[in-house]
Image (tube, rainbow, N blue to C red):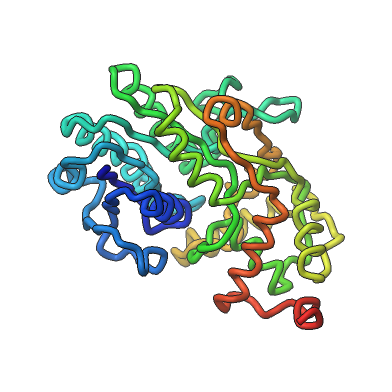
Amino acid sequence: MRVLVTGGAGFVGSHIVRQLVARGDEVRVLVRQRSPLRNLMALDVECCYADLMDLRPLRESVRDCEQVYHCAADYRLWALEPSELYAHNVQGTENLLRASREAGVSTVVYTSSVAAVGIPQDGTPGDEETPVKLEDMIGDYKRSKFLAQEVAFRYAREGMRVVLVSPSTPVGPGDFKPTATGALINDFLNRKMPAYVDTGLNLVAVEDVARGHLQAAERGLAGRNYILGNENLTLKQILDLLGELTGLPSPNFRMPHAVALGIGAVDSFVSGTLLHRHPRVPYEAVKMSLKKMWFLSARAVRELQFDQTPVREALLRACHWFVENGYAPVPPAWRKAA
């Protein structure tokens, strides 16, 4: 079967590509000219160089494909030109789905995000049916993903088999960029985490997320969204677990949210507005931390037979990958064990 994966050189996308290649599919990967291809090395794939904003090469890329996995997204919690987020995430999704429908693609799996899922006011985990609207979205990234998700739902209502998946916070090997969560793990390994804030994340192994995409293509219902997550943990619990795995100290100072918001506001103004570079602590990221990003994956487990690796194992694989690839030194406890 010939399959197209957009964003296939990225963290989640490359794991999808690996699993598709392993099962014997003929895989086409949509990449931009400047995309680093380290995650695709030694994989037997066809690279198509195109931009989601250009319909002509998109039509050529989806030609003769039976399935499309739309994993590409502009993931930035700060952007000098926020309009770029809407162009890539919303219009890019519209263009790809249009080209796929014209080409007669049988199934599209759209990678949404828990960023576009509702979070209950009482602090309990959200799920696919938690009420949410555009006004609830904090920042341009979340708003753009919410609007892109609406595009996918519309194509499904119009009769196209579009299945949506919403990964929570993937961790594991291959996070070259790294993602925001990968940067957190990397900072911990480099002892750059003197404090933490009272927030929470839902962690999941990146390999499980990739497998969930394939399961969605096989078993998912058109127009239905599936959260691909696993364990709900506070940030402090995550840091303590990293401490157990590496022997490094976990921070004990909990920074008040008011202080973190102040730091984010100053950094976003100085780094972003004045210096035109990505802030280390984006203000909108701090605002998001005011709510625990906790979710339930029961629907995916029940309907997709979604597999979930213990988060402890996923974090350990991530730590080993960062150390082996030179992002961080070997933790002292590992040196002693060797």
Q: Which of 151 and 133 is in front in this view?
A: 151
* Snapshot quadrant of residue 324: bottom right
Is residue 132 left or right of 67 when viewed as pictured?
Answer: right
Q: Where is residue 42 in the image (x, y as percent from the top left)?
A: 36, 69
- Give the residue drawn at x 68%, y 25%: 120
Check the image and report above or below for 332 versus 316.
Answer: below
Most extreme residue toward the right, as rendered? 252
Is residue 293 left or right of 4 when viewed as pictured?
Answer: right
- Give the residue drawn at x 74%, y 66%: 193
Check the image and report above or below for 80 versus 295.
Answer: below
* Snapshot quadrant of residue 67: top left
Q: Position of residue 189 (x, y in %)?
A: 70, 71
- Give the residue drawn at x 51%, y 50%: 77
Q: From the image, which quarter does the C terminus lie in?
A: bottom right
Can see residue 182?
Answer: yes
Check the image and report above or below for 13 versus 218.
Answer: below
Q: Position of residue 51 (x, y in %)?
A: 24, 51
* Snapshot quadrant of residue 58: top left
How many badges with numbers are in the image? 0
- Give the residue drawn at x 59%, y 28%: 118
Can see residue 80?
Answer: no
Is residue 45 left or right of 39 when viewed as pictured?
Answer: left
Q: From the image, which quarter does the N terminus lie in?
A: top left
Q: Which of 122 and 259 is in front in this view?
A: 122
Q: Which of 203 and 76 is in front in this view?
A: 203
